[in-house]
Image (tube, rainbow, N blue to C red):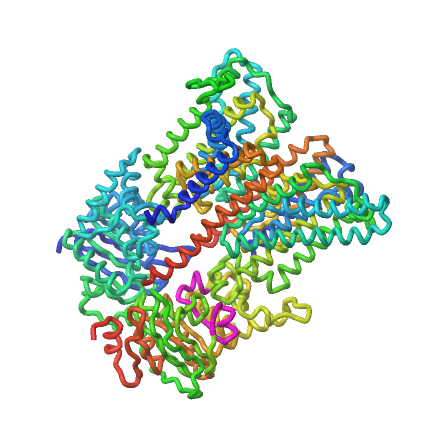
Amino acid sequence: MTVPFLSLKRVSKQYAGVTALDSVDFELQKGEIHCLVGENGSGKSTMIKIISGTIDPDPGSIIEIQGEPVQNYKAINAIDKGIQVIYQDLSLFPNLTVAENIALCELVGDHKRYVQWENMKKIAEKAMARINVSLPLDALVGEISIADQQLVAILRSLTRDVNLIVMDEPTASLTKHEVDSLLAVVKDMKAKGITTMFVSHKLNEVLQIADRVSVIRDGKMIGVYPAHELNDKKLTFLMTGKKVEYRNFTPELKSNVPILECRDLSRAGDYKDISFDLRPGEILGITGLLGSGRTELALSLFGITKPDKGEILINEKNVKIRSVQDALKFGIAYVPEDRHVQGLINVQPVGDNIIITTIDSLVNKFRLIDKKKKRERIQQLVENLAIKIPGVDSPVQTLSGGNQQRVVLAKWIATNPRILILDGPTIGIDIAAKFSIHEIIRELAKQGIAIILISEEIPEVFNNCNRVLVMRKGIIVREFDTAKVTMDEIQDYVNGTF
Amino acid sequence: MKKLLYRHETYVLLVIIVLAIVITAINPSFFTVENLFDLLKSTSLMGTFAIGMLFVLISGGIDMSFTAVATVTGYTIAVLLLKHGDSMNMALVFLVAGGLGILLGMLNAVFIYFFKIPSIITTIATQNIFYGLLTVVSEGKWLYGFPEWFDEFSSIRVFTLYSETGAPYGLSIITVIWFVLLVISWFILKHTVLGRSIYAMGGNIGSAQRAGFNIFGLTLFVYGYMGLMAGIGSVIQALLVQTVAPNSLVGKEMDVIAAVVLGGASLMGGTGSIPGMILGVSLIAILSNGLTLMRVPSQWYEVVIGLVIIISVGVSAYRRKKITRKRVITESN
Amino acid sequence: MRQKISYLSILIVAMIVVMVMMWIFNGNDFMSFNNFQSMGYQLPELGVLSLAMMITMLTAGINLSIVASANLSGIVMAFILTGMVSQEGVVQDSSGVVVLAILAGLLVGILIGFLNGFLIAVVGISPILATLGTSIMIGGISVVITKGYVISGFPKAILTIGNGSFLGIPIPLLVFLICAGVMTVILEKTPLGTRVYLMGSNPIACLYSGVDNKKVIFQTYIISGILSSVAAIIMIARFNSAKADYGESYVLQAVLASVLGGVNASGGFGKVSGLIISIIILQMISSGLNLMGVSNFLTIAIWGIILLLVMVVKFLLEKNSQKRKFS
C-alpha cells in the first residue's frame, strides 16, 4: 500500500473534561473518495477542525501528511499542504461576484495588492476548466442557486494546488439533480488525483461513489469499511450501536368526515393542482425531493404564502388562510423545516419559546400575565413531552436537537391543534431521539389530531403514515396506501424513475 | 438593462434629473456654470466625510464619532495656525489633521475589534469623549484670523471665468482636493485587494475570517480612513469658512449617513460604491441649493429633505421587499 | 440568567463607586437632600427619553426621532397653552387647558409613532433610516410652524409639573418613576412585552409562531412616541418654553443610557431596572462634576468613558465565563 496522504494516529481531544475524540486513527489515501459518518456530537466536527488546523489535538496525538509527521499544525500549514475545507454554510461572500469569490482568497493569500478584473476572471476560468463546469462569472453569489454556490466553494479551493477537499454535509440543501452533478464533479477531481472527504450525519447519495467509509461514534473510531459493503441498516447500526428497527404504525381514523380538504390548489412556481383530504386521527405523509413543492404547500396551508387558485376547506367550509394568525384560528399548527431560524428563538428561554403561541390565554382579568398559569402551562408541557431541560429560564439553544424539537412540538400542542403539519420533524436528530419524536406524533394522532408528515426520508413516512402523497415538480404524482406498497416503489416515484 | 432598472442608483439619478429640470424651469440660474462650481465647492465638505462613511458602511460598521474627530482635528490645526502660522504650510496642515484623524479613527477600531463592542455603541461613546474633552479644553471658543496664506489657498482656482457682473469664479482647489480623494478612494475600492476585502468583510465577516483575511487590519484601515477623511474634512471646513467652531459639526453625522445610504450603501454592509455615493451627496446638495434658488423659505428645507429621504429609501426598501419575496419563491423552483 | 444578574451587579457596583467618588470630591454638598432633589428634577428628561429609546432597541430597532417628536409635541402643547392665555388675558380655567394641551401632545406622539411603525413594518425601511427620516422631517415641521422662535409663557398648572414637588419628591421624578413602572409592567407582565423580547431576538421564528410582528412594531413605536410626548411635558414645563431644536444631543445620550443599562444593541435583552441605575449613574456624574464647577462637556466625555469601560468589563467577564465553561 502506498503512503496515505493524511493519517491521524491516536488523536484525542478533550473540551472541559469532555472527550470529543478518543485516540482516533484515521487515514486518507491519495485520490480516494472517503466518507466520515457519525451522529450529531460524535466528534465529526472536531475531526474537521483538527484536519483543517483550526484547533490543536491533545498532546500525544500524531498527524502525518504524506508520511511526514507535522508539528505545531495550524490553519496556514493545512492550506500550504493543499488541504481545503468547505463548510456547510459554504463561507462565501454573497455581495461579490462569482469570479471574485473564486479568486479573492488566492489574491489575499499571495499578498497581492491590486485587482485586475481580467486576471481574476482568468483564475476563475482556469478553476472551472479543471472540473468542466461553467458559471456566470459576473453574477453575484447571493443571486445564484445553492447548488451553484456549492460549486463556487469548490472552485475557490481549486485555485491553489489542492490535494484534499473536505466537504461538511455537502448535499444537505441540494436537489437530486444537483447532487448528481456534484458527484460528477467529485469523480472528476478523483481522476485528477484529488482526495475528497465527505462528512455527514446520515447515509446519502455520496455513498454511491465513495471508496471507503469511516464510522465514528461517541468520539471513537468504530471502523473503516469498503463503501459497497454497507447498506442503510448496517450503517445505522454502526453509527448508533443500537439495532434499530422502524416499528410500523397504522393510524386509525377517528372520523370519516375530512377536517381539511384542498381542491385544485395552485401557486405559480411552487405547486399546482393540489387536491387531497385529511381526516382526524390520520397521518398523511407527503414526500418528495427538495423543491418538489412539499414545503411550499405547507407554507400556504399555514398562511405564510397565499395560493393563487383553488380552495381550502376546513370542516367542509370554504376558508381563506391569509396569515399565520388565521391558520391558528382554524386549529392549524406547523413545525417548520428550519428549526433554528423558523422554529425556535435560540437565545431566549425555553419557557418563553413554549408559551409564545398561547401567551394571550395566560392572562388574568387585568390582561396581565398570570405567573402561576404560565408556570403551570410550561411545566405541564415539559412533563407531557418529557423535555429534558436545565431550567425553564435556560436559553433553548443549550438543549440537544431532540429536546429542541420537543420544545417546538410543545408550543404547538399548547394550542390544541386539530391539524398538525410536521415538516422534516427529525432533521438533524439522533436515531434514538427520532423514534421518540415518532412516538409523540403517533400519540397525537391517537388523540384525534389530523397530521400531515412531510419528510424526504421514505422510511419515516412509510412507517408512520397510512397514506403517502408523492410530490415532484410541484404536483402530486401519486398517492399510495402504505399497506399496499413497498418503500422502493415510493422511492421510484420520488426520483421519477418508475 | 433590466438589472439597471432594479438598481437603487438609477432611481436616485432619475430624481436628480427631474429635480434639476424643475429647479432650472423655476430659476434658470441653477443650471449655470457659476452655480455648479459653487455647488461643488460647498459640497466638498459633506462629500469628503461621505467617502469615509462609505468605507465604514461597506465594511459592515457605522461611525457616529467622525464629526467629533473632525472637530478635534480642526481645532488642533486652528490652534497651530494661530500660534505658528507663519512657519507652516498647507501640506503640514493636511498632514497634522489627517494624521490625528487616523489615530482617533483607529482608536475606534481597537475597541470594536478587541472588545467586540458594536461599532454604533463604540462610536457614540467616543463621540462623547472626543467632543466633550475638546469643548472643555477649547472652552467652546471660536477661532479665526488665520494667516493670509491659509485664506489665499482657499480662493485658488484651477481656472477662472468671469460672470456678467465681472465677478470671478471657477473650479476651486477645494473641489479638486475632493475629486482627487474620490478617485483614490474609487481606485482602492474597485481595484485593490484591500478594497475588495472590505466588501468581502461587509458581506460575511465569518467567511472572511475563515478565509484568512486580516480582520483587525481591515478594521483598523476602515476606521483609520474614516478618521483621515474627517481630518481632511476639517481642513476643508476651515478653508471654506475661515473659522473653527467647536460646535459646528457634531450633530450632523446622521445627515452624512443619510446621503451615503441614499447613494445605495446598505447599513447591513457589503454594498455601496463611490459613484452611488456621489449621487447621494449630489441629491442632498442639489436639493438644498435648489430650494434656495426656488425661493422656498429656509424653514422648509428639513421637511423636504426628510421627505426625500423617507420616500427614496422607502421606495427602494419596498421594491426590495417585493423582489426578495419573489426570489424566495422562484429559488425553490 | 446568571450572566444578566452579574451585569446588573456590575452596574450597581459602578453606581456605588461613582457615588463614593463624588462624595469624596464634593463632601456633603453631594450627599445632601438639596443635591439629590435637584438631581430628581434633572434626570427625568433623559430618563423618559431613554425609556422611549429602550423599547425600540429591545425589538432590535432604534428610534432616532424621539427628540424631534418630543419637540413637536411640546410645541403643539405650547400653542394650545399660550393660545388660551393670550385670548383670555389671564387664564381662569387653566387646568382644562392643561389637560387639553397634554392630550394633544400625547396625540402627536401617537401619530408619529404610528408613522414610524408604518414605515418600518409596512414599507420595510430599516428602523435607523426610517426614524432618521422622520426625525429630520418632524424637526422641519417644528421649525416651519414656529418659524424657529421660542414659544413661552405657560399657565401655572403646567409649570408645577416641571418644578413642583410632592412630599419633597420632585414631580418630574414621579412622572419618570410612573413611566418606568408602567414600562416594567408592559415588558414583564404583558403578552406584548414577551413578544417584544422574542421578536427582538428572532422575528422569523415569531412569524412562524403566529406573532403579528407588524402589530408589535406598531405598538412599540407608538409607546415610544407616547413616552417622547411625556418627556416633552417635562421639558416644556421645566423651561417654561418650547422650541424646535431643544435637546438634540439627547438622542445619542438615550442610546448611551440604554446600552449602559444593559440593553443589547442587537435586540432581545434589557431590563428597566438596569436603565434606571444607568440613568442614576449618569446623573450623579453630571451633578457631582457640576458641584466641582467643571464644564458640562467634561460630563459627557466621562459618560462616554464609562460606557466604554462598562462594555469592556462586560466583554471580559463574558469571555472569562466562557473559558471556564470550556476548560
Give x and y (percent) for residue B279: 43, 37
Answer whether residue B99 is visible to the viewer in this image.
no
Depth check: give the residue in front, C75 or A85. Answer: C75
Depth check: give the residue in front, B23 or A369. Answer: B23
> Is B322 rendered above or below residue C142?
below
Answer whether residue C237 is visible to the viewer in this image.
yes
Q: Which residue of the protein is positioned furthest toward the left in this rendering?
A: A1
**Placement of the C terminus of chain A among the 4 image quadrants:** bottom left
Tell me the residue at 36%/45% (across/down). Answer: B208
Q: Which residue of the protein is positioned furthest toward the top in this rendering?
A: B86
Tell me the residue at 47%/54% (across/down). Answer: C325
Locate residue A413 relative to residue A470 in the image: left or right.
right
> Is A391 rendered above or below residue A386?
above
Give x and y (percent) for residue B68: 56, 32
| Region in magenta | A320-343
Depth check: give the residue in front, B109 or A338. Answer: A338
Give x and y (percent) for residue B298: 60, 35
> How many numbered marks are there?
0
Tell me the residue at 62%/51% (across/down). Answer: C112
Give x and y (percent) for residue C218: 58, 57
> Residue A326 in magenta?
yes
Depth check: give the residue in front, B227 or C286. Answer: B227
Tell me the residue at 63%/36% (across/down). Answer: C300
**Placement of the N terminus of chain A among the 4 image quadrants:** bottom left
> Residue A378 in magenta?
no
> Is B32 rendered above or below residue A132?
above
